[in-house]
Image (cartoon, grey):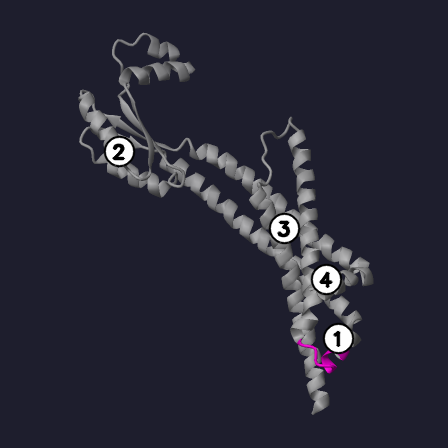
Amino acid sequence: MRLLTREALLSFRRAPLLSALSVTTIAFSLFTVGLFGLIAINLREALRDLEERVEIVAFVLRGTPPETITLASQDIATFPEVLTVTYVTEDDALARARRELVEFRDAYRDLQVNPLPASLEIRLREGFRDAVHAAAVAERVRGFSFVEDVRFGRDWVEQLDGLRDLAGILGLVIGGVFAAVAIVIIGVTIRLTLLQRAREIHIMRLVGATNWFIRGPFLLEGALKGFLGGVLALVLCYAGYTAFRNNTSVLGGLVFFGPHHMFVIVVFGVFLGLFGSLVSVGRHLRTVSGRLDRRMV
C-alpha cells in the first residue's frame, strides 16, 4: 500500500499540469452539477412548502349531527395517507371568509343567513401529497353519506407533480452529461501519463508484473484527483451559495448541502477519478499485451 501511495503521489510531481487539469476538470464538472443540485434542493424546499398546502376539503350537508361528523373524522384520521382532519363549522367558515377575503368583507358583513357550509379539511402526510393519493382519499371521503362535495384542486396538484418530476429528470440528465465529460477528460489525462511511462510499464510486464499491480498506482492517482476535485467543487459551490445568499435583495432563505449531500459529491468525484483511470489503464494494458503476444509469436 505504501508503494502504491508513493507511486501515485509521484505522478503528481511528474506531470503537475496534467494533474492540475484533471483535478480542475472534476471540480468544475462537479461544480456545475452541484450548482444545479443547489437549485434542485432549494426548489424542493419551495415545493415542500407548496405540498404542505395540499389538502382535501369535504363539504358537509347542513343539519348533519355533530356526533356523526366526529365519528367520521376519527375514521378518516385512520387513513394511512391522512395527517390531520379538522372540522370547520359554518360560523368558523364565515369568520375565516371575512378575515381572508377582504374584497368581500362588506358583502359578508350584512348577511342574514350564513351561506357557507361546514367542512372537513384533510391534510395528507408527506409522501402522499400528490394527485394520485389525493384523488384516492377524496374518493373514499366522498363515500360518506353526509358529504355533499369534495375538492382538492386536482389541476393544481397535477401541475405540482409535473414540476417535481421535471426537476428530477433535469437533474439526472445534466448530472449524467457532466459526469461523462469528466470521465472522458480524466481518461485522456491518465492516458497521457501512461504514454509518458509506457517504457516503464512495458518493462514491468516483461518481468511478470500483474495487471492489477500496474493498475494500482494509476487507480489510486485517479481516486486522489477525484477526491481533490470533489473538495474543490464543494468550495466553489459554497462560494456561489454565499454570493447568492448575501444578495438578499434578490434571493433569501437559501439552504446549502447537508453533510450527506457533501459526502455524496466527494464520493462521486472519487468514483469519476477511479472510473476514468480504470478505463484508460485497461485500454493501455490491452494494447501492451497485444504487442507482447505478437512479438512472442
Give the amino acid type for the residue marked by disc 4 in the picture: Thr
Give the amino acid type for the residue marked by disc 2 in the picture: Ile
Locate the C terminus and report the quarter of the image it occupies: bottom right
Mark 3 vs 1: CB contact within 8 A: no
The crowd level at tag 3 (other Cα within 10 Å; few <14, some 14-19, many 20+) is many
Which residue is under mark 1?
Answer: 201
Q: Is residue 29 above or below residue 140?
A: below
Q: Position of residue 177 (x, y in %)?
A: 61, 56
| Front-most of residues 189 and 221 | 221
Q: Which residue is farthest top?
A: 110
Q: Quadrant of residue 251?
A: top right
Mark 3 vs 4: CB contact within 8 A: no
Image check: 92 left or right of 256? Answer: left
Image check: 47 left or right of 274? Answer: left
Which residue is under mark 4?
Answer: 5
Image check: 143 left or right of 110? Answer: left
Label 3 to label 4, Cα distance in Å?
19 Å
Label 4 to label 1, Cα distance in Å?
17 Å
Q: Quadrant of residue 121?
A: top left
Which residue is under mark 2?
Answer: 76
